[in-house]
């Protein structure tokens, strides 16, 4: 016979079991153990994504499998977990399977062809682009663009933003003609939009258009879009993107023989104090020496070390070879090359100053 306490325990367990049978599966799955295992897997994925892709891939798979139970199979978070896992899979067929699964989840939530599908497709394209899956990223951005164009009245800013992303991908992929077309469209669409996001995208589109002109050695055409970008970006003088913008202008101006214009941006970069005193400076603009080896046959890499001073305007002064070449002809070539370099000068108490004892190593 059961005691009263044993009967009470039995009845309690029976009631809990009956209650569990009435709960939806996704609620059932959210046990403390499931949540704990999910958090552990997701944390491991986040901590190893850059340093150990194999470990991250296994952690992403576990997070996805557990996440389906925790959040349900038709949940935005489950779709994101599928994307995380897909980006770490090397086999393209498997990658596509999980990407398609993510899209299917989004479609079940937002409706096929709906305006609400634009944002998830853009996020998917962005994730793939960040993961260097440029071809797949372009495909999903194209799908987003078709939807945004269909819903153009509600999505003008997004049409422009997608054109910008497709232009950026084309530029990174070396599809220069396509990049120019996309980026030009983006600039044209964005210049008529006044919201903050569109203004930010307008600056980025002009910066990338300037990059296109630099890549195609159209230096004069590069200046105007780069200056337009700088109008917005100069509000953030210490930002990496502003530094990149000014370096692009230095490259354009130096190739046009406009050294005074380049100096303005060398000084602006120097004023940010990005290069700590006592460290060897990195050039903002450099040229590659064009010289053949003396016998034309050596397969060994040689190094030539040059010492110099960077003056208060970022020019090279008093250059001399320290080591690496006994050929007078080669010495002249390397000294001529270093003389064309530009640097960001050091600033002391708000004033640009000359910095001696700098060195650069040419390898040929």
Image (cartoon, helix red, strand yellow):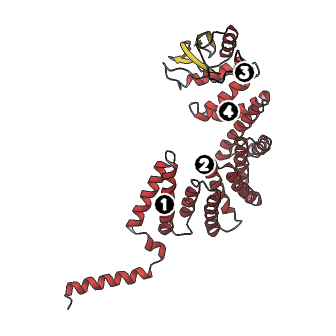
Q: Earlier in the sequence, mark 1 or mark 4?
A: 1
- For the residues labelled 1 and 3, the Cα–Cα distance comes to 51 Å
Q: Earlier in the sequence, mark 1 or mark 3?
A: 1
Q: Earlier in the sequence, mark 3 or mark 2?
A: 2
Q: Is residue 300 above or below residue 325?
A: below
At which x and y percent is residue 143? Answer: 72, 58
Q: Is residue 47 above or below residue 324?
A: below
Kindly identify which residue carries mark 4. Answer: 231
Kindly identify which residue carries mark 1. Answer: 63
Q: Is residue 363 above or below residue 203?
A: above
At which x and y percent is residue 149? Answer: 76, 57
Dot 3: element: helix
- For the residues labelled 4 and 3, the Cα–Cα distance comes to 21 Å
Which label sits in the foreground, 4 or 3? Answer: 3
- Left or right position of 272 against 342: left
At which x and y percent is residue 270? Answer: 57, 22
Q: Residues within 10 Å of mark 4 (few under 14, many from 20)?
A: few
């Amino acid at each position: 016979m059961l005691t009263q306490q044993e009967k009470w325990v039995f009845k309690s367990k029976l009631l809990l079991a009956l209650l569990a049978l009435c709960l939806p599966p996704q609620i059932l799955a959210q046990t403390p153990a499931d949540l704990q295992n999910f958090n552990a897997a997701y944390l491991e994925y986040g901590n190893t994504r850059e340093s150990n892709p194999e470990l991250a891939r296994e952690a992403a798979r576990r997070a996805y499998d557990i996440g389906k139970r925790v959040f349900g199979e038709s949940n935005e978070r489950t779709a994101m977990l599928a994307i995380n896992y897909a980006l770490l899979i090397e086999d393209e067929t498997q990658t596509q399977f999980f990407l398609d699964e993510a899209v299917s989840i989004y479609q079940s939530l937002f409706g096929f062809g709906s305006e609400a599908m634009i944002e998830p497709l853009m996020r998917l394209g962005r994730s793939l682009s960040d993961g260097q899956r440029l071809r797949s990223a372009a495909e999903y951005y194209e799908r987003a663009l078709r939807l945004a164009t269909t819903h153009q009245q509600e999505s003008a800013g997004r049409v422009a933003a997608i054109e910008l992303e497709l232009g950026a991908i084309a530029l990174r992929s070396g599809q220069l003609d396509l990049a120019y077309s996309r980026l030009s469209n983006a600039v044209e669409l964005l210049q008529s939009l006044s919201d903050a996001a569109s203004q930010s995208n307008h600056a980025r589109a002009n910066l990338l258009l300037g990059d296109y002109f630099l890549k195609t050695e159209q230096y004069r055409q590069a200046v105007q879009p780069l200056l337009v970008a700088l109008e917005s970006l100069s509000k953030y003088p210490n930002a990496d993107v502003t530094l990149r913008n000014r370096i692009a202008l230095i490259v354009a101006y130096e190739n046009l023989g406009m050294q005074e214009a380049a100096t303005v941006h060398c000084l602006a970069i120097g004023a940010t104090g990005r290069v700590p005193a006592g460290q060897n400076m990195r050039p903002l603009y450099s040229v590659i020496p064009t010289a053949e080896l003396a016998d034309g046959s050596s397969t060994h890499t040689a190094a030539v070390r040059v010492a110099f001073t960077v003056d208060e305007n970022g020019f090279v002064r008093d250059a001399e070879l320290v080591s690496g070449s006994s050929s007078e002809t080669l010495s002249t070539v390397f000294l001529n090359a270093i003389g064309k370099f530009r640097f960001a000068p050091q600033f002391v108490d708000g004033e640009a100053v000359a910095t001696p004892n700098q060195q650069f190593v040419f390898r040929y």
